Image: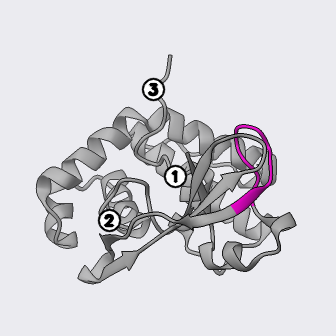
């Protein structure tokens, strides 16, 4: 199980009563070591080696990885990197152009865009629900040329609303989107 947090270092330092709760049972989470190290690529070719914290639920036998929102589970690229590809696709650019601009393999970028297009309605729903709950006046009203463009716009509006209403402006837009999608930006549950 995975828990996305805007600031993993702050979560680590927070008193136990302020740690996130178990998403399954609501029990308090206690520190329980670290997950394995991995290296991820950020914009500009920067490589980051990360080792997320693990936490154990006091109400069930589950353990959780407490993942910083700059990271996506199982991805070798940061959420900022993936977000730039999604933003470019929402603006009508193709996977080859984006891959060249980001210096990433074409097949990787093509896979991200295919997944995001397949999940566009779910991503749009997450964004719209968050905007309606936090700042209904900020709800996007213009029709966009593609479902992916509508989804990206709704997610950005939601992330901005989160920043205004709940704080977190110090964290990147795509980090807030990662938290809104619970780390499942490219891996939402299939609909139906």
Q: Secondary structure at mark 2?
A: loop
x and y, in percent, of residue 191 in the image: 49, 23
Q: Is residue 26 magenta?
A: yes
| Towards the viewer: 93 or 169 | 169
Residue 188 in the image: above or below residue 76:
above
For label 2, the residue is 77
Query: Which image quarter: residue 81?
Result: bottom left
Q: Is residue 141 visible?
A: no
Q: Are marks 2 and 1 in contact (CB under 8 Å)?
A: no
Magenta residues span 20-30
x and y, in percent, of residue 125 in the image: 60, 36
Q: Quarter holding the N terminus? A: top right
Q: Residues within 10 Å of mark 3 (few under 14, many from 20)?
A: few
Q: CA distance from mark 2 to mark 1?
A: 13 Å
For label 3, the residue is 190
x and y, in percent, of residue 35 in the image: 46, 63
Q: Residues within 10 Å of mark 1 (few under 14, many from 20)?
A: many
Q: Earlier in the sequence, mark 2 or mark 1?
A: 2
For label 1, the residue is 183
| Towards the viewer: 103 or 150 | 103
Q: Are marks 3 and 1 in contact (CB under 8 Å)?
A: no
Q: Are marks 2 and 3 in contact (CB under 8 Å)?
A: no
């Amino acid at each position: 199980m995975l828990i996305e947090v805007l600031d993993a270092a702050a979560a680590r330092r927070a008193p136990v009563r302020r740690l996130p709760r178990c998403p399954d049972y609501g029990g308090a989470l206690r520190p329980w070591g670290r997950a394995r190290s991995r290296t991820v690529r950020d914009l500009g070719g920067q490589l980051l080696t990360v080792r997320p914290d693990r936490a154990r639920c006091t109400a069930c036998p589950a353990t959780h990885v407490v993942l910083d929102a700059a990271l996506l589970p199982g991805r070798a690229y940061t959420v900022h990197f993936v977000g730039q590809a999604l933003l470019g696709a929402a603006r009508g650019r193709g996977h080859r152009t984006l891959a060249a601009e980001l210096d990433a393999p074409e097949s990787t970028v093509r896979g991200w865009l295919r997944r995001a297009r397949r999940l566009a309605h779910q991503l749009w729903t997450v964004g719209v629900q968050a905007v309606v709950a936090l700042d209904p006046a900020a709800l996007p009203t213009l029709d966009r040329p593609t479902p992916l463009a509508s989804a990206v716009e709704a997610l950005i509006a939601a992330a901005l609303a989160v920043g205004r209403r709940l704080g977190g402006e110090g964290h990147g837009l795509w980090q807030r989107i990662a938290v809104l999608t619970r780390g499942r930006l490219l891996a939402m549950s299939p609909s139906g």
